[in-house]
Image (cartoon, coloured by chain):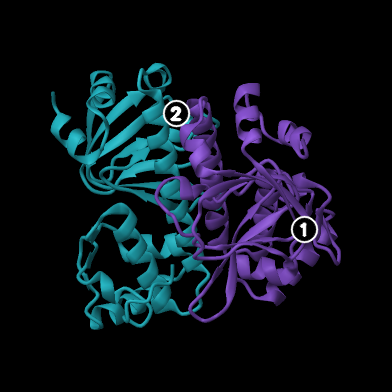
Chain colours: A cyan, B purple
Amino acid sequence: MQGYEEFQKRFEFSPELRNALFENAQYQTFEAGEEIIAQGDTLDSIGFVLEGVLTGNRGNYDGVERMIGLVGAGDIYAETGLFHTTKAFCTFQAVTDCTVLVVPNQVIETIDNKLEMMEFLFWSQSKKLQYTSMIHFASTERDKVIKVAAILEAIAHYSHLEDIPLTIEQLASFLGMSRNTVSKSLRELEKRGAVEIGKAGIRIKERYLLTIDGSGKKLF
Amino acid sequence: MQGYEEFQKRFEFSPELRNALFENAQYQTFEAGEEIIAQGDTLDSIGFVLEGVLTGNRGNYDGVERMIGLVGAGDIYAETGLFHTTKAFCTFQAVTDCTVLVVPNQVIETIDNKLEMMEFLFWSQSKKLQYTSMIHFASTERDKVIKVAAILEAIAHYSHLEDIPLTIEQLASFLGMSRNTVSKSLRELEKRGAVEIGKAGIRIKERYLLTIDGSGKKLF
């Protein structure tokens, strides 16, 4: 029954759906840095994140990998395989130690509580869409400090993270900004008391200050 | 029965679901430039686009509106109201003349073929998520011509458009680029034979050429 309690805690399913998923799930652990799914792999199951954070990174024509998303505990990954995309369009990698439950697509397709499952999938995709739209909207912002603050606020809000396990390098690649500009903006936000920059990532100290000029007014 | 044939053509629903939605739908038309839903409005129904193109624009703290998405025929809008967001986070505006069917959320929630509807909603959100991820990924690209080409290819692919009814101004705001850079990149793509720049927007002449250096290799 490894992972059952975390599954119950992280995902609000009816007992019927929860048990049906859990009975057919595989419990897996990944160490920080480990690859979970490679870009181009066939997606034949959904991952439910119980603990930890993973990123989606897409390799580019120039050989550089860029982060396109962040998935935290309570979120799912690889769900697009259920419908229209059978190949992963990014590599999923653990950024911290992760535990996940992996459920084959076949199980989802034939499950008794399919309506509840589909409502969850719609809700989850919709949340990710809002997240991604927000990140894209913020990325066109010209004021660099407002931009970095808004993205951190979005990550904190949607991924439920207080400790964002990203290096300045990773954040810069995510935002299409230079390492130097991200670094300067972060130091500005640190001075404001909004964040603390550590070796393992960025700690959100006060979300309220991660807003336009720290006044609580949000960019998105 | 106004709009029934277009609804049947644009949306692949079972006859039962199609009829249930259609019976409870309101047929509406909007002229180019007209506002359909204002940012902050309560979302109490879903729109099914039968003809035309509309954009989602979000007003910013600096008073400037930025485009955050494009919705074409066969797509839906305002569907987030069904679940977690009851207020519109952007203004929906017709960019060309549009005809739409509007179905109250209450109808969707109590419909007989709810599973089919939820599967459609999941699929639709998932497609929009891939679209938005692609746009964001491309927006961090440093080569301006590759960037503009990739975005146009994405719009053509996901919104099924050959004529993209956007001005250079609108495209620039969408991409967080200057009008001048977008204009130069478009002229480069026009020379390549990929697009034709007209007064009413950008016509895609050859999608194959809207790729990295025109060799068919895609950015995303």
Task: Residue under label 2, please give it.
Answer: A43
Q: Residues within 10 Å of mark 1 (few under 14, many from 20)?
A: some
Looking at the rendered structure, whether the residues under marks 2 and 1 are on a common chain is answered as no
Q: Is residue B16 left or right of residue B156?
A: left
Q: Position of residue B157 (x, y in %)?
A: 68, 44
Identify whether B101 is placed above or below B165.
above
Q: Nearer the viewer, mark 2 or mark 1?
A: 1
Q: Residues within 10 Å of mark 2 (few under 14, many from 20)?
A: many
Chain to which mark 1 belongs: B
Q: Position of residue B29 (x, y in %)?
A: 75, 53
Chain to which mark 2 belongs: A
Task: Please state which amino acid type lies under the numbered disc 1.
Answer: Thr
Q: Residue at x 30, y 62 (%)?
A: A167
Q: Is residue B179 left or right of residue B81?
A: right
Task: Residue under label 1, please give it.
Answer: B96
Q: Position of residue B144 (x, y in %)?
A: 65, 65
Of residue A88 and residue B64, the one placed in the foreground of this image is: B64
Q: Residue at x 55, y 44 (%)?
A: B104
Q: Residue at x 78, y 33 (%)?
A: B5
Task: Please state which amino acid type lies under the numbered disc 2.
Answer: Leu
SS label for mark 2: loop
